[in-house]
Image (spheres, rainbow, N blue to C red):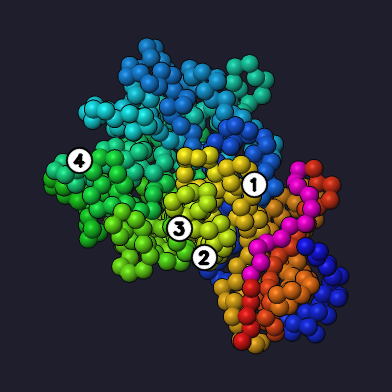
Amino acid sequence: MITRKLPLAMGLLALAAVLGVAALRAVPATASVTQESIFQDDNQLKLNPTGTMQTLRDLGVQRVRVNLTWSTVAPAATSTRRPKGFDATNPAAYAASAWAPYDAIVRAGVAYGVAIDFTIDGPAPLWATGAGVPRGTSGDFRGAWEPSAKEFGYFVRAVGTRYSGSYEPRGSRTALARVNFWSIWNEPNYGYDIAPQGIGPGQSIPNSPHVYRNLLDAAWSSLQATGHSTRTDRILFGEVTPHGVSSWGVFSNMKPLIFLRSLYCVDSGDHELSGSAAAAQGCPTTASGSRSFRKDNPALFSASGFADHPYEEASPPNEPTHLCGNKLCVGAPTDPNFADLPEIPHLEATLDRLNSVYGSHTKFPVWSTEYGFRTKPPDPNEGVSQADAAEYMNWAEYLSYRQSRLYSYSQYGLTDPPPPASFDTGLENPGGSHKPGFDAYRMPLFLPITNPRAGQKVEIWGAVRPAGYAKADTGQTQTALIQFQSGSKGAWQTIDTVPVTNPRGYIDLHLAIAGSGAVRLAWSYPAGDQLLGSGTLYSRTVSVTVN
């Protein structure tokens, strides 16, 4: 497509004479204008840390989330016998080759200016799991069975030491860079990550919250002991799946807000658990125990934030979901115990109430750390079209931006896995070709109103995600072009230029558009910038019908 780039003066003439556009650059008072973009693709980062980090920088990613998996680093992980004489707190006691993928990611992050979020995660080595695993349990489910909080604390101490900023691995003359962003365990309300989810008759008594509480306390203590406190670092907890079932059994999903209440030892009426219910869930059963709960579980009250995975997966991001049979449906009735994107305000209110039970006034920010939309294709069974996924991504990020306590927008997956693997939320197809979501992620665009009245101002929200890197490289504030196509076949014209001054690349303005047509954003990588890509980029196109 040939694009005509008009000089600013000519563009402003077109603005007034052709389209009758009046611009107002105003950021909503409730906007999360500095929300981070977080990206995760562990497989690609481990396979090619440098090349993948370059691609992510080109996309404008500010932070990568990486699951630092306990069993991939621990020695003899498939043995039920703990290695004799093993000092699990000493990073040098682990094989250098086991740390190597994570060291390489940290070094690549430093080279390209992309920050790191390590989610210290299971499965556990088998020698650090509990007794009673059901016969026939295998794979990661085996390592999820009652992971030892004591041993996990030792491992976190080794991790915290290694990535303290002063640790020199054997054979190296320089210290590894410091990591200052952490999260503890992945999806603890899912039986793949902590099991059993439930115990007792019909596995109806929550168990995973108790296990996770102990893991979290141990990790918190070890991070503090190695110089990683909330004064210098961000430490998140939660990382919950957004959905679940009413009968979670041993290996299924517990609904996240049910999990949270048990984690805080609180019942559905926002009262502290007591008696046998408290004892069964590992909660205080005495008045003195209740009084010390806040002191004994500091992460639940003093962490940097709560992490959520607010997937809808294959439905619009503004519609709450509920279970209908064995699938997710939208519309009434909504599930009050879900934590997908439309339910974030309810999640925040629940966290506030749980803190207040113990006299805490903490209002945690919520971090979206894993998110995306499944596409069909390549998934043969589930998902939305690739074009719809691109639109939903931009819509979801806009909704996130409008929530002041939501501190990040996340994307799970760069390249979809080859068949038969699924969960295809990536920006690229298995062979590496770009989905529409690739460009939509790099330069999001969303118009909440696309059928305005004549003269009505329309909000044009979007981002030039790589703009922050471009300014860091060149010292120059970047400029986004707002382009308009009259009708369906007219030439694209630049109707406004917008300095990108937001540190995350966001723009948010209002224009009155006099005629029907289409809107897009355009921006060019700085010429000669060796750390970014090249050429002119465009957002997806949004049609506007003026009534």
Residue 2 visible somewhere in the drawing:
yes
Alpha carbons under labels 3 and 4: distance apart: 32 Å
Disc nearest the viewer among 2 and 3: 3
Residue occupied by mark 3? 314
Helix, strand or loop under label 3: loop
The percent coordinates of residue 64 (x first, y second) are: 57, 43
Residue occupied by mark 4? 199
Residue 283 visible somewhere in the drawing:
no
What crowding class fits label 4: few (fewer than 14 Cα within 10 Å), some (14-19), or many (20 or more)?
some
Q: Which residues are magenta?
A: 531-542
Disc nearest the viewer among 2 and 1: 1
Q: Residue 512 appears in which quarter of the rendering?
A: bottom right
Which residue type carries mark 1? Ser
Upstream in the sequence, badge 2 or badge 4? Answer: 4
Q: Residue visible at 55% across and 19% down? A: 96
Residue occupied by mark 2? 399
In the rendered image, residue 507 lying in the magenta stretch gets the answer no
Which residue type carries mark 2? Leu
Which residue type carries mark 4? Ile
Upstream in the sequence, badge 1 or badge 3? Answer: 3
Helix, strand or loop under label 1: loop
Helix, strand or loop under label 2: helix
